[in-house]
Image (cartoon, rainbow, N blue to C red):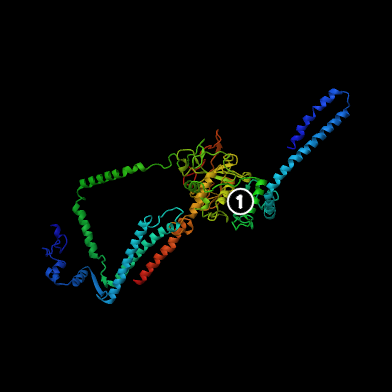
Amino acid sequence: MNAHDTRPGSSGGADTPGPLHGGPDADYTPEQLAAMSREELDLLGARYDGVEVLHVDPGPEPGSRMEKRAVRQVGWTFAGAGISAFLFLVVYAGSGWFLPEWNWATEGTTWSAMFNPLLGLFMGLAFTLAGVGLVLYTKKLLPHETAVQDKHDGSHFDRVTTGATLVGGLHNSGLARRKLLTRSLGFMGAAFGLMLIAPLGGLIKNPNTGNPLGRTSWAEGVRLLRDDGSPIRPGDQQPGSLETVFPAVPGGNLQSDAATMLIRLRPEQVAADRPKEGQEDFGYGDYVAYSKICTHAGCPVSLYEQETSRILCPCHQSQFDVTQGAKPVFGPATRSLPQLPITVDDEGYFVARSDYIEAVGPTYWNRERI
Amino acid sequence: MSTTNPQSDAPTDAPGRPVDRARARRRSKQRRRIANVAGLMASLVLTGSLYSVFAPAQAADDTSESAAEAAGRELYERSCITCHGENLEGEPNRGPSLIGVGEAAVYFQVHTGRMPLVRQEADAPDKPTIFSDEEIDQLMAYIQANGGGPTLPSGNLRDGDLAEGGELFRLNCASCHNFVGEGGALSSGKAAPSLGDSNDLEIYTAMLSGPENMPVFGDNQLTPEEKRSIINYVQTIKSQADPGGAGIGRIGPVAEGLVIWIVGIGALMFGIFWMGSKA
């Protein structure tokens, strides 16, 4: 056997009948095929693929007025697409050259406002006109044919013969008899599997080691810093104010779990303040500090209404009352914002007295156990 | 000054008495009493004359200062006293005390038309200003003189670093006012207003005084330079063109997504159905 004989009736690409006959080459000699016209060959090929052309609606008569009009329409549409694409390039490359410079500055606002829309307009127009041209071309100039193709569905014959082929493969491999091969293959497979999986083992570890979700960078004596790194004295804020503060550790203002709101209460708020039980001494004077991370879904809660003492979360409208230990009073949050115990150090700057006594942010399944 | 004069007069009177006693020790107590009374009378006369010398100057100062204050008081008693009380002490369930709010708060509340309030509701909405600039100055003078508090800044209020202002705005202001100052909703019908028609001084005084539910940003929290940077950012971003052609309220991806879903995908669906019906 050689490669040429694998397909019945094939001559391996040569235009001469092969030694094994069958299939179309047996039915049609090269001479017969050479005598046929292009249309006949097309239909014949389709028939051998199970396709029968029922009806052909030829396009417009060549040279007719109808054809000329359709050609003009399609041609101008394609030309329009080309012009639009070219105008895109003109706007894109010309800005700052022979057209005004596009920029974000406040001057030259008309051109700045038109630059992007013009780019979009011309690119969109180019694609739309190209599409319209293709549709017009297909509908007005190409012949339309109606064809039917046989659907192939598996017969009983196909199922039986395919099954025999598969079973024949297993039989020929001889694996049922050749135990050494079976065992060595099994050993090889197991070793290969281990080789591929073992490096992934380095990725498997306990994510709760060291309780990363329950701890932040706040600790005893860590100063409260503004975003620009400056420390804060109790005299810096006015009553009824809020400042977002971060721990004085390297990269502290980039740690998403450490952001804290330092709030100075107004005298009326101090009078109404009812801290959480056991946390009465967490504040300092009229200052209190609460985590900025919502206990529902972890959004930053800093929409502070200083008259109503409410802190709002912008994501799901949870509201926390600052004078009740940041207890949730509205919305989906179920836990109070954790309070950071604060005091003032020797130099008069705010410091934390310890880390948060509970995990900040949303609840997780084993939060209470870590 | 008038209180120190009798004391300073008394010692000049005192040396006379030992001299008298040295000359005639047998003079009666009555004479000493007469001398005391005479000394007292002399000191009173001296005090009175000194007071009449100094007092007119003080009185002249007082009247020149209080011309604006008096006009302010008149305006106050006509438009503000109902809620804020006779002595700026506030009225329970009507209006807060104005002691210590300063002219900054007066400028913001009156210039944006929030005060006088039409009725008590969730918010004090901004309205067309009902006082003229001169009347606002008079009100500010009256409140500043009687309550004290933060004063108006001077100089160019946009004299600050634009990029730093943007960072400070996003850190301190954007949570309520949106990242380009379009405002947003708060709880129970309240809302953080858009900064679209705020002038420099209104933004500055708002930060300084913390009107309504807005937190206060004192000068030790945001320095005057930082406040100017923020104002520069807000006013610059307001005057910039929308690079996409349409800002769609400039409230970000929600509005943009809504428009592309409804208008963009709507147009695509229309095209698809049209092509399907033609095929």
Nearest the viewer among B161 and B31 is B31
Q: Residue at x 13, y 57 (%)?
A: A2
Horizontal arrangement in the rendering, residue A293 relative to residue A89 (left or right): right
Nearest the viewer among B28 and B238 is B28
Q: Residue at x 41, y 63 (%)?
A: B265
Horizontal arrangement in the rendering, residue B269 relative to residue B221 (left or right): left
Q: Position of residue A76 (x, y in %)?
A: 31, 69
Q: Position of residue A122 (x, y in %)?
A: 37, 62
Secondary structure beneath label 1: helix
Q: Position of residue A119 (x, y in %)?
A: 38, 59
Q: Is residue B147 above or below residue A51?
A: above
Amino acid of disc 1: Tyr
Which residue, given by chain and number where applicable, does mark 1 sit on? B107
For the N terminus of chain A, the quadrant is bottom left
Q: Residue at x 53, y 41 (%)?
A: A340
Specify the quadrant of the image occupied by residue A43: bottom left
